[in-house]
Amino acid sequence: MNSIPAPTIEYGTLAPLLVVFAAAVIGVLVEAFAPRYLRKAIHVPLTLLSLLGAFALVLVQVLRGRVSTTASAMGAVAVDGPALFIWGVILVLSFVCVLLINDEGHFVASAAAVPGSADEEEAESMSGGVGHTEVYPLVLFAVGGMLLFPASHDLLTMFVALEVMSLPLYLLCGLARRRRLLSQEASMKYFLLGAFSSAFFLYGTAMVYGYAGTVSLPGINQALAVGASLDPLLMIGLALLGVGLLFKIGAAPFQAWKPDVYQGAPTPITALMASGTLVAAVGAVLRVFWVGLGNLDWNWRPVIWVVAALTMVVGSVLAITQTEIKRMLAYSSIAHAGFLLVGVMATFATPEQNAVSLKAVLFYLAVYGFTTVGAFAIVTLVRDPGGEAGHLSRWAGLGKRAPVLAGVFAFFLLAFAGIPLTSGFFGKYAVFAAALNSGTQPGDSMGGWMAGLVVVGVVASAVAAFFYVRVIVLMFFSEPAADGPAIAVPTAGTVAVIALALLVTVGVGLYPESVLGVADDAASSLFIR
Amino acid sequence: MESEIAQITQHTGGVIGNAWLMIAFPLLGAFILLVFNRLTDRWGHLLGVAMSLASFVVAVLAFFELIGLGEAERRRAVHLYEFIPNLDINMGLLIDPLSISFALLITGVGSLIHIYSIGYMAHDEHRRRFFAYLNLFVAAMLLLVLADNYVGLFIGWEGVGLASYLLIGFWQFKPSAAVAAKKAFVVNRVGDLGLLVGMFVIFTTYQTLSFAELKPIEVENGTTLAIGLLLLLGACGKSAQLPLQSWLLDAMEGPTPVSALIHAATMVTAGVYLVVRSGAYFFPEGSGAALAVAIVGAATLLAGAIIGCAKDDIKKGLAGSTMSQIGYMMLGAGLGPAGYAFAIGHLITHGFFKADLFLGAGSVMHGMNDEVNMRKYGGLRKYMPLTFWTFFIGYLAIIGFPLLSGYFTKDGIIETAIEHNQVLGWLAVLGAGITGFYMSRMVFMTFFGQKRWAEDAHPHESPTVMTVPLIVLSIGAIFLGGYLVLSNRLLLFLAPAVGRPEELPTFHFVSVPGITTLALVAVGAGYAWVRYAQAEVPVVQPRGSFVTTFARRDLYGDALNESLLMRPGQWLTRIAVFFDNRGVDGLVNGLAAGIGGSSGRLRRIQTGFARTYALSIFIGAALLTGALLLVGTI
């Protein structure tokens, strides 16, 4: 009889991942055994320290030059340069989001209670305004999933990561304390559509396995190199895999969930989704297309070209008529997903060009994530009696009532628009330049079409600039309403979040080399194939 | 053919090697005065004078170092720094007889006018700013004449334009001054465009803009003719020659020292410098370009003289005279190396006697409550004797009274012109006669005849700080011409830089053109004596014949500009605005409305129903699959 070989696990390499998951498990135990009044006091340091610890472990690997060059855990996980960079970014962003989550009043005390019922009131009075403390372990699980998602080296691990990441988020979306029906609706929609798209992903995995006989990404790529690449089984599998991944980054035509979910979810969770999830999902897209389907780029790149163009246009155009600040930011996030896809498109020419393009995408992810978190942090501060002042008309004249806050928000908006001297400018510039360059490489499958995509991107940016600037005009050149929203006094955590986001946005805008250099180091080793 | 100009050689060390100090001093002065602003109010004017004098000292030392060199080695280039490395354009200075002559004039007369201004601007609360601009002007003008390439020249050219603009509009609270400054700037743009395009053509043709690397030509071709005409356009703008003359008369709105320094002695002669400096390269003797220069000069000298006859404003009369005298210089500059020497000679002597006249006029105004209308002067010689005598010497010099400066240099131009071109030459003789009339008219109306003063006028002599420069300038107006022209001193000195004529001219004290000129001047002066010294001068301007009106209106120069340039320009802008509103804006607004509209329509797809979203995902998946299968089969 064959004995089952004991799996080898590189604990050192995987340590950041394990720390986060371990902390999440401890968090569940805390929920089970610690008294209610102690839970938050335990959760906050536990969560923050575990994220910090994981980040430190990532740093140790990078600084000691111990970036692994082979896949870990029996070929299930690849902790390579780009993965470590993405891990670092996700860990910092989620740390920052946890600071936002700490603020009182974002989360409901009893999500299961009917809104407005006596049960709800009772739970509210019992919790003392703290709300569900399950939020912390849920966030840790989601972050763990986000870490694993872009580092998965085979499709099954990736699917598991996808679910580990998504399931806590579905729940978290439904926990908003204000506008609970909207929140529950968002949670429900996200769950249904997420499950739907996960099914596509799983079905695609099965199809590709049917073609290649393996779920390992490099294995698939090798099968592509030798097999008949026009097999319908492969094509259908590829398309269904794409649906699952593109859904997560919110590319058109799979973007419909984003505005509804972003609007309904508690704003700190929106910030986490708009930054961490997007980073993780783009990382996964890069890995699947680059490691698993690199030999098939002639087939899938034209399709992604259309998706990228459509995403940029849909995001920018639809954002124009939005009247709700979080919905507007959701559409902005869709447009940015499109810009990121432009960068993804650029990573398939020559090896040197790939490193440059990969660097551009990584850089974009890092700087965009910070600006996004900063913007949502400010959204949490502008409040009406019934919660956050979502409608844009309520933001009129904010520049006169709270000039610093409005000024910082305006700066973030300019960074989204990609105005020079902000980090957003260099992000966009890097991605577009990489796309233009890749199109001129000999043997590139897209050639001049890359330039066309950049043109679409620039036009979309111009359209997008309109709605960003419109908010600035509204804030600074309109008379404030008499009963305008109150500006909440920010807690130290929120101030730190906004300050950090501003620092990165300004600092990288003035001195892009700081982050570009790190991204360059990460990208130069490319993904493990 | 004339002998070639001397080679330009590199120079290091000595005063010449540090000639950049000449520019640096006044530039530093302007910088300090403008940056430290009010802090320097109390001593700013002294700093301005000191900087100008320092520059003058450097110029004198450089001059003596230059004449200590052998004749063939008197063209020294000083490399400063790489300016535009991509185009291989370096910034450097060229110290040669031509440029050092200008530098001496600019810093010498400039310093005198700086000193004079201490008194003239004593009661102006912005005197410090005035000196800052004057220093800026001196620095820019020195860069213009000292640069060893057209790029440096152009920077100086624009710099003096800026200083001129700032100084004409110095009293910008007067709308007339603000308008005059703008007019000067706009008209100069036309000329500057000519210079700039000329430089472009030079660079594309020869791949260089350095005087050292350009080669002198013997015969002109189409390209050099085009370059010559473009440079002439630039010269016309800066030197107020036809057809770009209209700004100079209005420029008299500036303070009088400005009129003396910039709009008489130095800046307006930059056009003459440009033509003489480019002479060997683009205006060879007998070429079409040179003839064009001479024609422009002759036409302007007559036009300026005619305008001068009809002006009652003493400064505008002098401005007309300046136009006319620069016309003489241009005429000389169109006549080859023999003419160059007389043109530069006349330029230098004119710098002295015209500055003398302007400062004298300023002195009169100073004593007459800033009245400029000569019809309200009269009989002033007893009340301001020093001003009268210095003004009178300047007057004698400009009309060419024998043995004074103007006599030698103007007569030199006239005689050379007659040798080259009878028509232009005799027109210049006629112009000299008219000069005799209008300058006599000015002197008689101001200093002789009846008192026609305003009631509150109390004429008095100006302070010493103003009269001393007048005395120094009038000494120059007496002796300088003879010194420069007799024994061809200036011609031989300039020869290494501008070339030497085949035959050295000898100055004839008695010649047909000379005698004719003197006779005509005497007739003009006599007629003026009868009309303006003997007869009663009406205080209110009489209507006058149509010729007088023609002259009073500056020969309808403004009307011509207005109908030929301004109105078509206005129509052009109106059409452009119309097109912008209807066409461009329409397109842009339409586009924006289109995007907004499609946004509104697309928005309806976002129904809020999870089933719709799921359907869109399903359709998307189907499309993706279809597309991939399709791409696979292609």
Image (cartoon, rainbow, N blue to C red):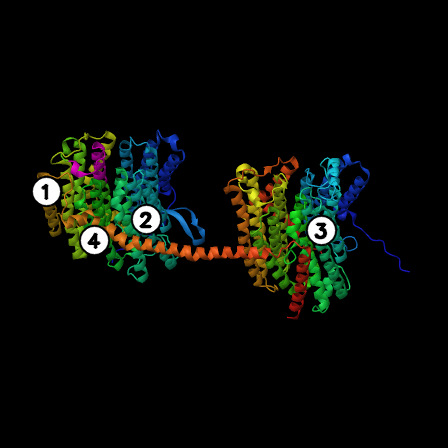
Magenta-colored stretch includes residue B49: no
Q: State which quadrant residue B208 falls in.
A: bottom left
Q: Amino acid at mark 4?
A: Ala
The reply to whether label 2 and label 3 mark residues of one chain is: no
Q: Residue A76 appears at what percent x and percent y?
A: 77, 55
Left or right position of A230 against B115: right
Magenta segment = B355-377
Q: Amino acid at mark 2?
A: Val
The N terminus of chain A is located in which quarter? bottom right
The reply to whether label 1 and label 4 mark residues of one chain is: yes
Q: Residue at x 33, y 50 (%)?
A: B189
Please state the total of marks drawn on the protein image.
4
Q: Chain of mark 1?
A: B
Instruction: Mark 4: give few (<14), some (14-19) or many (20+) Cα within 10 Å.
Output: many
Nearer the observer, disc 3 or disc 1? 3
Residue corresponding to mark 4 = B299
The answer to whether the residue labelled 3 contacts the one labelled 1, judged by CB atoms less than 8 Å apart, is no
Q: Residue A176 appears at what percent x and percent y?
A: 69, 43
Residue corresponding to mark 2 = B186
Q: Is residue A295 visible?
A: yes
* Distance from the alpha carbon under mark 3 to that under mark 1: 107 Å
Nearer the observer, disc 2 or disc 3? 3
The answer to whether the residue labelled 2 contacts the one labelled 3, judged by CB atoms less than 8 Å apart, is no
SS class, disc 1: helix
The secondary structure that dominates the magenta segment is helix
SS class, disc 2: helix
Residue corresponding to mark 3 = A188
Residue corresponding to mark 1 = B531
Mark found first going from the N terminus, 2 or 4 = 2
Q: Residue B31 appears at what percent x and percent y?
A: 39, 37
Left or right position of A92 against A509: right
